[in-house]
């Protein structure tokens, strides 16, 4: 298992947002996480990415205990993420955003930077441009991130996360607000990335995207994991259907 | 001893009136109105003007001071804060713009009245003394304390039980939801500033009466203490501000006994600092730390 | 050339003052760049001033070394201060640094060795124009280079969105502390230079008024690059002199400039040259001054 979470629990005041959840993500897979609104998906992701500290439970990544580690440590270890509702650095340019994403892998020598001549960060910039080309944003490298269209911003956020060369990528509702064509392109990108050895945890509402992309899916409801299995199993599960029918969502 | 307690409660009352307005604006709009000390000073000067130039009695002067500073508060918002709100500027910008207003207003007052202390015309206030045991207490201060309590009760009633109060509370809690639910946001904000500045101005008049002294820079020490009061009581909490004010008043008077005069200011800041380090959310306030 | 010489000597104090204020403005700029508002740099300036002056007077420390020790003293104070207050959200940080500044001022007022309220007099005038402007040139250059580097980008990211910045692997607290301590070092250096320029110092020179003044330099000048605060400092230091006939209205004018700038040109006067870009930045909701 690349990521192993055991007994994760998180309370906010009187509400238990995540309740003793176990999660095991094997490497080289797309792992889906679904559930009705308010099921605790984003809280769980925040626990895994280090933005929240769990009240109970452990998290192991690549064999090492990373429970309670802050986000920057986890990124250095190889976990990257995107956010629900894009969180880009709006005032920075497209390429600057991705360069920031590459922060933990920058090979630039800080002292040489003081000399006005030469481009000490050429290697990193080239690497970043390649990433931008991959999602068709290379031509807009100098544009301000805040000026991009929503779809472009989403793609930029994914590329920013990739810049740190992660082993595990957490995608928090990446397809929200996308039209079918864009969702299709997203699916292609995810497939390609996993083909290159990346592991992806996909949190999504778009159940079709999840069914069509993930090898394994976990279902949360009211903070508990109520089901886990291959897409077929999940689709046929009475428990899952009930969870969704019991809420506003339609499976 | 009784005298010191008496003075502590008196100064606590002034701090409370001043800080509650400051906390109100912070809780509703999430900004630190650094022009608040100017309304303190303006209230005192308005009263001075009413008594000295217009020849009005002290109770009329108090009302005029309240109305004048309340209106000034509304104007202040229109000039310094509303444009920033419109473009979604961060709180720092509001701090700086209110600072700019302070610079301008203080200087204008100084130009008109000079920088020295001014006293009220003789006979402005009936002065009476209360004798309890060994202690001689100034009656004016008692009246002020009572007035302060009445005002704070009035504010509590306003916030808890009126529709305007409900609007203000909704705005403080969740501006977007409030707007959607039909709250007249502009009216609520104007009312917030009117009340906040009016109370601040009253604090100024009352202090001016008690010390019989008014000057253009009288607001500055208050401003720094307002921070302490807010942090101790909990940022954005009105009852917290009141509580913090009295704690500060008592603490300052007590520290006068043990510390040399030069360090008196240090008490307020030392307290502020310690609270920020140990319990930044204060006694009754919201969370103040990072870590999502 | 001779006219230049005459001009320089006539206005040398003013030019020196501009240089010192520019250094101070840069010290605040640095922390604003990382998204932090600190009102404590006046206190750090005071620490630099007093430490360097006292070292010279009582231990005969050579000028440059005294300056360095003054800066280190400020940095040593800034580090633990920063660590304790960085847990606090923005507004609280401003208040905490303000409180710190006042505590320092009060301590200076009460400690005998500093001369208490009388301050220190008769500080030897060791500062020369070239000291100030060399410092300024070096600092401005370094800051300019840092801006385009990983460190500068990290600070900009923190300013825009701390949570997202942490996700990129940036050790947010460390970077904030770095900007804060660097600002303190800079302010203290400027303080040391200033003390040996004005011959006497007193605690009230380093209080709330000064802290606000430094902030105003940085904000009015502008944030985009180091030239902004330098320009702001130059303008606002020279302006009172130029407006001398309007003596009484100087403060009002400064207040008005500040008000107009913060409302209409929040990224500072420097952005007049880049109005379109500024408008774009504002429209997309990029981080404002801080």
Image: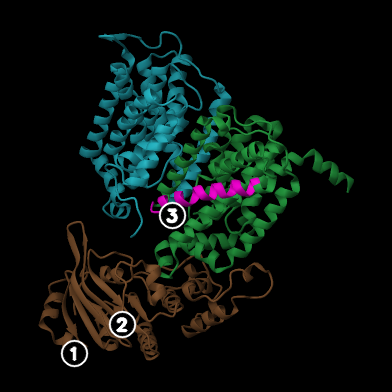
Chain colours: A brown, B cyan, C green
C-alpha distance separating marks 2 and 3: 42 Å
Q: Which mark is residue B88?
A: 3
Instruction: Report the residue at 31% width, 13% height from top.
Output: B139
List the residue tagged with mark 1. Answer: A232
Q: Are marks 2 and 3 on the same chain?
A: no
Spatial CA distance of label 1 from label 2 is 24 Å
Q: Which residue is mark 2?
A: A2
Q: Observer-nearest residue: B131 or A248?
A: B131
Question: Quadrant where the C terminus of chain B lies?
Answer: bottom left
Q: CA distance from mark 3 to mark 1?
A: 47 Å
Observer-side mark, 3 or 1, equals 1
Under circle 2, the secondary element is loop
Residue at 26%, 37% in the rendered image: B239
Q: Residues within 10 Å of mark 1 (few under 14, many from 20)?
A: few
In which quadrant is the N terminus of chain B drawn?
top left
Q: Nearer the viewer, residue C217 or C75?
A: C75
The count of marks equals 3
Q: Position of residue A36 (x, y in %)?
A: 20, 73
Residue contact between numbered discs 3 and 1, judged by CB atoms under 8 Å: no
Given residues C133 and B32, the one toward you in this image is C133
- The segment highlighted magenta reads C66-88
> Mark 2 or mark 3: which is in front?
2
- In the image shown, does B107 or C46 lie closer to the viewer? C46
Q: Nearer the viewer, mark 1 or mark 2?
A: 2
């Amino acid at each position: 298992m690349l990521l192993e979470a055991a007994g994760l629990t998180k309370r906010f005041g009187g509400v238990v947002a995540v309740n003793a959840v176990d999660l095991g993500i094997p490497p080289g897979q797309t792992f889906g996480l679904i559930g009705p609104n308010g099921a605790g998906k984003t809280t769980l992701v925040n626990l895994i990415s280090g933005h929240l500290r769990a009240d109970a439970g452990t998290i192991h990544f690549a064999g090492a205990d990373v429970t309670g580690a802050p986000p920057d440590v986890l990124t250095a270890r190889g976990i990257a993420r995107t956010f629900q509702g894009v969180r880009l650095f709006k005032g920075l340019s497209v390429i600057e955003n991705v360069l920031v994403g590459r922060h933990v892998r920058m090979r630039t020598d800080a002292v040489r930077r003081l000399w006005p001549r030469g481009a000490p960060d050429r290697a990193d910039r080239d690497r970043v441009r390649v990433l931008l080309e991959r999602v068709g944003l290379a031509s807009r490298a100098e544009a301000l991130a805040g000026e991009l269209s929503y779809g472009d911003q989403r793609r930029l956020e994914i590329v920013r996360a990739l810049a740190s060369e992660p082993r595990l990528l957490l995608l928090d509702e990446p397809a929200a607000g996308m039209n079918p064509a864009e969702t299709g392109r997203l699916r292609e990108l995810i497939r390609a990335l996993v083909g290159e050895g990346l592991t992806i945890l996909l949190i999504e509402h778009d159940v079709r995207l999840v069914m069509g992309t993930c090898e394994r899916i976990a279902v949360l409801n009211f903070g508990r994991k109520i089901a886990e299995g291959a897409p077929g199993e999940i689709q046929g599960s009475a428990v899952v259907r009930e969870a969704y029918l019991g809420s506003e969502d339609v499976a | 001893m009784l005298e010191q307690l008496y003075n502590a409660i008196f100064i606590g009352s002034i701090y409370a009136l001043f800080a509650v307005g400051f906390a109100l604006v912070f809780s509703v709009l999430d900004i630190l109105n650094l022009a608040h000390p100017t309304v303190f000073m303006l209230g005192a000067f308005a009263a001075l003007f009413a008594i000295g130039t217009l020849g009005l009695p002290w109770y009329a002067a108090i009302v005029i001071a309240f109305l004048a500073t309340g209106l000034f508060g509304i104007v202040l918002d229109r000039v310094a804060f509303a444009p920033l709100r419109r473009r979604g500027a961060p709180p720092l910008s509001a701090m700086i713009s209110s600072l700019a207003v302070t610079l301008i207003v203080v200087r204008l007052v100084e130009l008109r009245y000079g920088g020295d202390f001014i006293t009220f015309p003789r006979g402005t206030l009936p002065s009476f003394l209360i004798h309890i045991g060994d202690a001689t207490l100034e009656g004016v201060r008692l009246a002020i304390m009572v007035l302060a309590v009445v005002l704070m009760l009035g504010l509590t009633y306003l916030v808890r039980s009126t529709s305007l109060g409900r609007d203000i509370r909704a705005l403080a809690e969740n501006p977007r939801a409030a707007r959607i639910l039909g709250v007249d946001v502009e009216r609520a904000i104007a009312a917030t500033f009117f009340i906040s500045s009016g109370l601040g101005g009253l604090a100024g008049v009352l202090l001016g009466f008690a010390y019989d002294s008014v000057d253009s820079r009288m607001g500055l020490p208050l401003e720094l203490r307002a921070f302490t009061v807010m942090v101790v009581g909990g940022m954005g909490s009105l009852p917290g501000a009141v509580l913090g004010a009295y704690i500060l008043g008592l603490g300052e008077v007590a520290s006068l006994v043990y510390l040399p005069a030069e360090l008196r200011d240090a008490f307020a800041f030392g307290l502020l600092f310690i609270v920020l380090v140990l319990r930044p959310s204060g006694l009754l306030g919201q969370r103040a730390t990072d870590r999502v | 050339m001779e006219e230049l010489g005459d001009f320089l000597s006539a206005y040398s104090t003013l030019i020196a003052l501009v240089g010192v204020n520019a250094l101070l403005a840069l010290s605040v700029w640095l922390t604003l760049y990382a998204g932090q508002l600190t009102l404590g740099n006046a206190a750090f300036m005071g620490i630099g001033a007093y430490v360097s002056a006292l070292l010279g007077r009582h231990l005969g420390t050579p000028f440059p070394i005294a300056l360095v020790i003054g800066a280190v003293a400020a940095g040593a104070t800034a580090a633990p201060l920063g660590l304790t207050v960085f847990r606090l959200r923005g507004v609280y940080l401003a208040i905490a640094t303000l409180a710190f500044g006042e505590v320092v001022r009060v301590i200076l007022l009460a400690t005998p060795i500093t001369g208490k309220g009388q301050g220190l007099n008769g500080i030897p005038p060791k500062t020369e124009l070239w000291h100030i402007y060399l410092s300024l040139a070096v600092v401005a250059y370094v800051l300019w280079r840092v801006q385009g580097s990983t460190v500068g980008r990290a600070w900009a990211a923190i300013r825009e969105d701390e949570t997202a910045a942490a996700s990129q692997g940036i050790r947010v607290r460390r970077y904030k502390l770095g900007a804060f301590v660097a600002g303190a070092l800079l302010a203290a250096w400027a303080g040391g230079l200033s003390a040996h320029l004005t011959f006497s110092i007193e605690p009230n020179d380093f209080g709330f008024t000064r802290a606000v003044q430094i902030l105003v330099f940085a904000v009015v000048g502008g944030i985009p690059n180091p030239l902004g605060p330098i320009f702001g400092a130059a303008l606002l230091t020279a302006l009172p002199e130029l407006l001398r006939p309007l003596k009484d209205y100087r403060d009002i004018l400064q207040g008005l400039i500040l008000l107009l700038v913060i409302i209409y040109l929040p990224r500072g006067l420097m952005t007049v040259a880049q109005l379109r870009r500024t408008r774009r930045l504002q429209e997309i909701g990029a981080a404002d001054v801080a």
